Amino acid sequence: MLLRLLRTHLAPYKPWLAAIVVLQFTATVAMLYLPSLNADIIDRGVATGDTDYILHTGAIMLGVSVLQILCSVVAVACASRTAMSFGRDLRAAVFHRVGAFSGREVAQFGAPSLITRNTNDVQQVQMLSLLTCSLAVQVPIMMVGGIVMAMREDLGLSWLLAVVVPALFLSVGLVVSQMVPSFRLVQSRIDDVNRIMREQISGIRVVRAFVREPRERQRFAEANDGLTEVSIRAGRWMATMFPLVMLVVNMSSVAVIWYGGHRVDEGQMQVGALTAFLSYLMQILMSVMMGTFMLMQVPRSAVCADRISEVLDTRPSVVPPQAGVTELTAYGELELEDVSFTYPGAEHPVLCDVGFSARPGQTVAIIGSTGAGKTTLVNLVPRLFDATSGAVRVDGVDVRDIAPETLWSRIGLVPQKAFLFTGTVRSNLLHGKPDATDDELWHALEVAQARDFVERMPEGLDAPIVQGGTNVSGGQRQRLAIARALVRRPEIYLFDDTFSALDLTTDARLRAALRPETRDSTVVVVAQRVSTIRDADLILVLEDGRVVGRGTHTELLGSNETYQEIVASQLTAEEAA
């Protein structure tokens, strides 16, 4: 997965990668050439007292050093640019894939995990790409070139290379093999910490209301301790890496000086050659160390790449049509024909053979007990889910055959849980219609019974809204969400238990103001209150995902037992009549 991810998302940067290879190759060759020049200065200049040779060779060394420095700096700059661009593209790919997910896929992964995958996981893979661009060329060239140049200086000491290099590789491989499972657990534990923290922040009022702070602190402490334990385990192996490498390096240096000193004493080797051999050995071992540093990142990046690829390889269950319908001839007609829906892994369907039709100017209300499938039914219209069987048609066309932009432009959805984005009142309303004028915004607020409290805000339409709209009350948040749908003036309105957060007086005023606004539109209302839907043209009574009653309020009151029970639980007989 890691190689596939790197190969796919680094492909657009092949010219940059080619430049990095050339620059790294030039810098590494220059670095390998320097010890040889230094040996020549010692053996041919210092030993013989030839000052001109020392100055001439020293000038060459200076030029080679400047070339090596320039190539290294430019290569690192190109590598950084490529790695950052790679990270940007990968984050965008994950973001767009998640944006295409239906509710089914989002629930499958969970919001905390998706956030971690698009931030921490991408960052780990991005770091590996930076190390790859910086070291992947330099390390093998320096290692192979160092071995060749060291053997060129003295074959008698080359047996040390045959011992030291494999020993270093074996020790590094042992440590890396132990780090892989630890890093896999680290990413999983990070998900757990994010999930618990998200739950506690979102549900802080519930936690305090039920005095659950000690229990929640314990849950977080358990998750935090679990992450700490695994991180320490991985850190111990990581901390073992460098001392182990340095032990091999230092023992190698001692061995070279010991055996090389004897060869110099016996006249089989010159002092400059010994110095150069030691330098090449250090370069070889340093290349192994740099490779080790890169290998330390590989296990964690491999785990992260698997998690990212899992998101990218997941196909949304709601797939836009390849050649979707973009022109609809009718205006706001909605029809559900024998619609059934089953959640993945569920034993029983949430909806079973549900059907109704609605025309512009009509209001269809859906009522039923909790868990009857009301919200699921509404979510099938804008294709937040796709029906397992049956058909949902808008203006006579199956929603699965309509281009998403065309479908959504005809629907104004106000979800059960109103959500406002960080920004202002104006920016939230403009989600419904980006080019709406201030007059249109104020009119939508007036119909939604939100104009009064917005006018009381010092900034009016430019009043700030914090994340999730938590700086306004639940009823105000709901009315702003309704206003956002009204600004769009869609052909079909979907109110998913929208009025439950409103008091009875505001509810009545709002429904009265909505009637002239929705006169030419189709309205589907999900409600718990009978008073909210009693004037609907058609009321559907859902029970266990099935329609057990349909008709007007008066008809159902006289014939449907389930509806009678709902009414009896809310209204007196005199009020019902």
Image (spheres, rainbow, N blue to C red):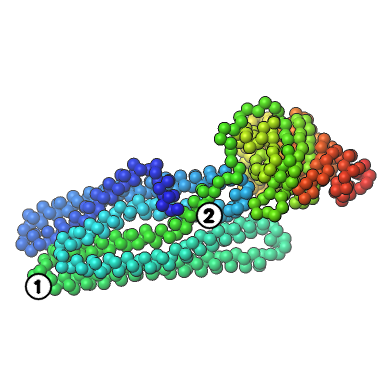
Q: Quadrant of residue 100?
A: top right
Q: Nearer the viewer, residue 272 or 61?
A: 272
Q: Secondary structure at mark 1?
A: loop
> Label 2 neighbourhood size at 10 Å, few (<14), some (14-19), many (20+)?
many
Q: Residue 461: percent from the left, percent from the top?
A: 65, 37
Above or below, 229 relative to 505? below
Does residue 502 appear to the left or right of 285 in the view shown? right
The amino acid on which the numbered mark 1 sits, given as a three-letter code, is: Glu
Above or below, 65 relative to 293? above
Q: Nearer the viewer, residue 263 or 88?
A: 263
The residue identified by callout 1 is: 266
Q: Residue 292: percent from the left, percent from the top?
A: 35, 62
**Quarter that holds the C terminus:** top right
Q: Residue 525: percent from the left, percent from the top?
A: 76, 40
Does residue 243 appear to the left or right of 182 in the view shown? left
The amino acid on which the numbered mark 2 sits, given as a three-letter code, is: Thr
Q: Residue 148: percent from the left, percent from the top?
A: 20, 59
| Residue occupying the far right of the picture | 574
Residue positioned 17% across, 53% down in the render: 61
